[in-house]
Amino acid sequence: MASMDNAGVYKLTDDLAIIQSVDFFTPVVDDPYSFGQIAVVNALSDIYTMGGKPLTAMNIVCFPTESMDISVLQTILQGGASKMVEAKVILLGGHSIDDTELKYGLSVTGTINPKKLLTNSGAKIGDKLILTKPLGIGIISTALKQGLADKETVAKITKSMLTLNDKASELMQEVRVHACTDITGFGFIGHTVPLVQNSRVGINIDLAALPVFPEAIEFARQGIGPGGLQRNREFYSPHLRISGNVPKYMLDILFDPQTSGGLLISLAPAKAERLLGKLKQAGVTDAAIIGEVVKEPVGVITVK
């Protein structure tokens, strides 16, 4: 889509459209079962982001048959299947190839009423912004690969990545929000840029209000981060304006690529506290109001 939205939508009737997306990646945790779960949750997120209901999926598998035991793949697929059951998604099949590097994910098809479709183009001046999951997963995942993250920290980010965005999606539809995107591989800034550009607005972010894993801050202070963080910084920095004294390690977190991240929701101020309360009651406990939509500068994210 020209708007760089989260999924493709094909209108069938005035009240029904199909919504499709595909996503797969290499392992972000050591446990095969958890990796399978995370990959599925991540793939389903694009459907939830646009307000849709995922219905069917097909597995996408790249597996190194010569260097890895097939039981690992079986465990990955079992983990993925468990999350599809939780999401009430039917697995129709899939495709696998022999590859030197393990990868897993899904092609997902869902449905939506076109009149209720949410995009990253509808933010309105005065809107409040809600983020539903903490940032810092990419930084902590890198620390894990370097043997620096302890079990408790890994368990914390794994729990976040395993959490479906279904509840947040349902609740935001109930209160009729203006726009939504999810925060994944391009990081917080990278996924917010299309929102401000397509909506022809600016955004002010309250850095102190952002939900962030505390461990990610500590690792970022040490200069730990994935390669994608620097690529995100190089590409999206022109759209970022800093107001005040923002430390470099916090900028790293803003550009940090996320896996199975949360939703960024734009909605009228009068509805923001109500939605936040509903999210908390539904178990989305890290959700927070983190900024607002402003008239200008258009296409710029200002962090204070």
Image (tube, helix red, strand yellow):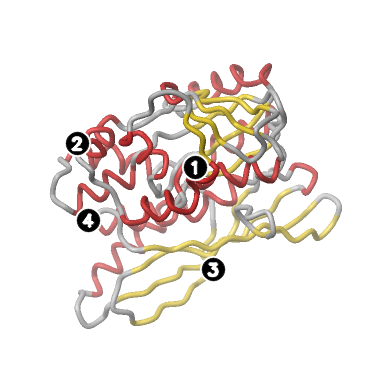
> Viewed as shown, does residue 13 lie left or right of 177?
right
- Of the numbered discs 1 and 2, the one sitting upstream in the chain is 2
Q: How far apart are marks 1 and 3 (CA)?
A: 35 Å
Q: Name the residue rendered at 48%, 45% in the picture.
A: 237
Q: How far apart are marks 3 and 2 (CA)?
A: 36 Å
Between 41 and 235, the residue placed more toward the observer is 235
Q: Distance between the residues labelled 3 and 4?
A: 27 Å
Q: Can you give x and y, in whole percent of width and height, for residue 5 in the image?
A: 63, 53
Q: Residue 11 carries which label?
A: none
Three-letter amino acid code of the residue under disc 4: Asp
Residue ID for mark 1? 189
Picture quarter with the N terminus: bottom right
Mark 1 or 3: the one toward you: 1
Q: How far apart are marks 4 and 2 (CA)?
A: 14 Å
Between 86 and 18, the residue placed more toward the observer is 18
Mark 3 or 4: the one toward you: 4
Query: Please, what secondary structure does the residue beneath circle 4 have?
Result: loop
160 over 4 or under it: above or below: above
- Of the numbered discs 3 and 2, the one sitting upstream in the chain is 3
